[in-house]
Image (cartoon, helix red, strand yellow):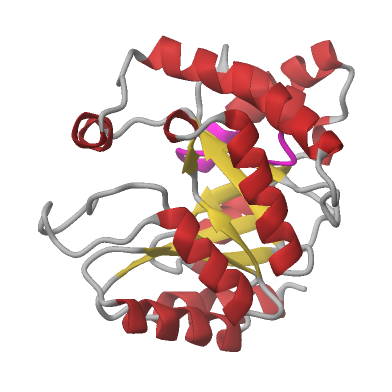
C-alpha cells in the first residue's frame, strides 16, 4: 500500500485520427477529470492500418501545453534515440514553461524498428539503446541545471521499461515515476528488485511513483495493483473516436477511493 494519491491518465495514441479529433479528445479528457494526458513518440500507427494517419509527439505536446490548464502531460514515452539529449532537455524545459510547470518527461530506450528504419536512425540492439539512455539522462539533468530560464520545477522523469538489471537501475538513479508492465505479482517482484537498486543508489524507493496500464478501466484490476503500490493508472485510447468510457469508470473509482 502507499500514501500517494491515486491518479488516472489517458494515453491518446496519435493514430487513425485527424488533428481536430485529437484536440477534442484532449478537451474531453481534461473536462472528465483525468490527472495526466499522454501521447506516444512513434512515427507510424502501432495498431490497425500500419500506414494509417499518424502525428508526431513533441509538436503535439506543445499544443497540449497551450490547450490545457490543469492536467500534467507528456509522452509515454519519448524515444531517446531520436534526439540529442541536450535538445531533449531544452524541449522539455520549454514545454514546462509553456504549461506553467505541468510537463512530465517520460522517456525510454526505444523499440519499434520501423520508426528507426524509415527515419534513418540506427536501430542498434536492446543493449546499445539502453546504454544510450543511460548516457543521455545525466546530460539531460545537467542541461536543465544550465538553461536560462531554468525549468519552473524539477521536471519529473518517467522511465518506462521492465528490465531488471539495467532499466530498473536507471529508474533508481533518475526516475520520479516508473511505468511498469505485467501482473500485480510481477510488479511486486520487480519493486523488490527496484528497492535493491535504490539501496545501492542511496535512495528511498518510496520517492518513485509506480505507474501501470489499465486498458479497459477495470476497477478490480486497479484495486489489485494498489495493493502492491501502484498509484498512476493509464488507459490507452486510439483514434478516431477516443472513447472515454473506461476513463470515466476509473475516474469514478479514483474519486471513491480518495
Q: Residue at x 75, y 16 (%)?
A: 196
Residue 190 visible within the image: yes
Residue 140, horizontal then vertical, whole percent: 69, 31
Residue 24, horizontal then vertical, whole percent: 42, 86
Q: Is residue 252 above or below residue 200?
A: below
Q: What segment carries the magenta color?
A: 175-189
Side of 118 relative to 71 (left or right): left
Res 129 → quadrant: top left
- Quadrant in which the C terminus is drawn: bottom right
Q: Residue at x 50, y 28 (%)?
A: 162
Closer to the camera in the image, 185 or 194: 194
Residue 203, horizontal then vertical, whole percent: 87, 24
158 in magenta: no
The residue lying furthest to the front in this view is 148
Q: Is residue 255 above or below residue 75?
A: below
Residue 118, horizontal then vertical, whole percent: 19, 36
Closer to the camera in the image, 253 or 36: 36
Residue 231 visible within the image: no
Q: Is residue 105 above or below residue 27?
A: above
Side of 196 relative to 47 (left or right): right
Side of 156 relative to 251 (left or right): right
Side of 180 relative to 111 (left or right): right
Q: Residue at x 20, y 29 (%)?
A: 117
Q: How many marks?
A: 0
Q: Residue at x 37, y 56 (%)?
A: 56
Res 251 → quadrant: bottom right
Closer to the camera in the image, 183 or 197: 197
Amino acid at each position: 500500500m502507499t500514501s500517494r494519491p491515486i491518479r488516472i491518465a489517458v494515453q491518446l495514441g496519435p493514430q487513425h485520427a485527424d488533428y481536430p479529433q485529437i484536440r477534442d479528445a484532449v478537451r474531453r479528457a481534461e473536462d472528465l477529470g483525468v490527472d495526466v494526458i499522454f501521447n506516444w513518440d512513434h512515427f507510424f500507427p502501432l495498431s490497425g492500418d500500419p500506414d494509417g494517419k499518424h502525428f508526431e509527439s513533441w509538436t503535439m505536446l506543445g499544443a497540449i501545453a497551450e490547450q490545457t490548464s490543469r492536467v500534467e502531460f507528456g509522452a509515454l514515452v519519448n524515444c531517446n534515440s531520436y534526439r540529442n539529449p541536450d535538445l531533449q532537455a531544452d524541449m522539455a524545459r520549454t514545454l514546462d514553461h509553456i504549461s506553467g510547470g505541468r510537463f512530465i518527461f517520460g522517456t525510454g530506450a526505444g523499440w519499434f524498428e520501423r520508426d528507426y528504419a524509415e527515419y534513418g536512425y540506427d536501430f542498434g540492439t536492446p543493449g546499445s539503446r539502453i546504454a544510450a539512455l543511460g548516457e543521455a539522462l545525466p546530460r539531460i539533468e545537467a542541461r536543465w541545471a544550465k538553461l536560462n530560464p531554468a525549468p519552473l520545477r524539477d521536471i519529473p522523469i518517467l522511465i518506462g521499461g521492465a528490465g531488471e538489471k539495467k532499466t530498473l537501475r536507471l529508474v533508481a538513479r533518475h526516475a520520479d515515476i516508473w511505468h511498469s508492465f505485467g501482473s500485480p505479482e510481477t510488479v511486486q517482484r520487480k519493486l523488490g528488485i527496484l528497492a535493491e537498486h535504490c539501496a545501492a543508489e542511496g535512495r528511498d524507493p518510496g520517492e518513485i511513483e509506480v505507474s501501470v496500464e489499465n486498458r479497459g478501466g477495470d476497477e478490480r484490476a486497479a484495486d489489485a495493483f494498489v495493493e502492491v503500490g501502484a498509484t498512476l493508472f493509464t488507459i490507452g485510447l486510439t483514434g478516431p473516436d477516443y472513447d472515454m468510457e473506461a476513463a470515466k469508470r476509473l475516474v469514478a473509482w479514483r474519486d471513491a477511493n480518495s
